[in-house]
Amino acid sequence: MEQNEVIQNSIRTKQRILEQLEEDYLSSCRDFERKNNELYDIKAKLLKISEEKCQIAYQYLQKQNSDNTEAISRLNHFSSNVYNEIISSFMKHQKNLEEKQSQVKDEYKKRQYVLRKEIDELYYKQRELNSDTQELKGE
């Protein structure tokens, strides 16, 4: 096989690897988006359940014939704590997801840079080889 063909095959191979890298990265982006949407859905469901349960408890306390001021105050405090825990957990998971996404993006950019540089170097070698071949034919 001629050196020019070897270089051309290397270029095609690197381009296929680059295309696969880009497809994998886009797939990862879609996965992160899906996971982020799931995270928002879970947060919304948990907040809704918490709200509904606290409403039921509040209505129950309102129906009692005794003074429930203290119980209602504790219920409000409990409800507030549950809300804060849900939000805190959501933010923690979202931050972890964003960090992972950032790592994937950084790794993609590094690998993409290296591959593009290698492809450019191969094109340069090919041009030099073709230039040398033209000079030899011209002599």
Image (tube, rainbow, N blue to C red):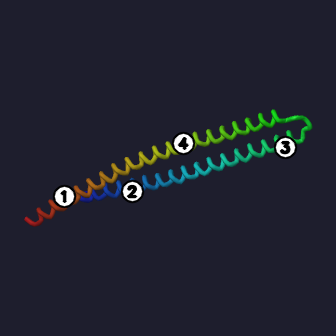
Residue 62: percent from the left, percent from the top?
86, 41
Identify the residue at horizontal 82%, vertical 43% (top origin).
56
Residue 2 visible in rendering = no
Mark 3 or mark 2, earlier in chain: 2
52, 96: nearer the viewer: 52
Q: Quadrant of the C terminus?
A: bottom left
Q: Is residue 122 visible?
A: yes
**Corner quadrant of residue 134:** bottom left
Amino acid, disc 1: Glu
Q: How far apart are marks 3 and 2 (CA)?
A: 64 Å
Q: Along the polypeptide, which appears first: circle 4 or circle 3? A: 3
The residue tagged 1 is 128
Query: Looking at the picture, which amino acid does disc 3 mark?
Result: Gln
Which dot, 4 or 3, sits closer to the camera? 3
Where 70 sits versus 28, above or below?
above
Q: Which of the two labelled residues, at mark 2 and mark 1, occupies the earlier sequence position?
A: 2
Q: How far apart are marks 1 and 3 (CA)?
A: 84 Å
- Residue holding disc 2: 16
Q: Which comes before the other along the chain, label 1 or label 3?
A: 3
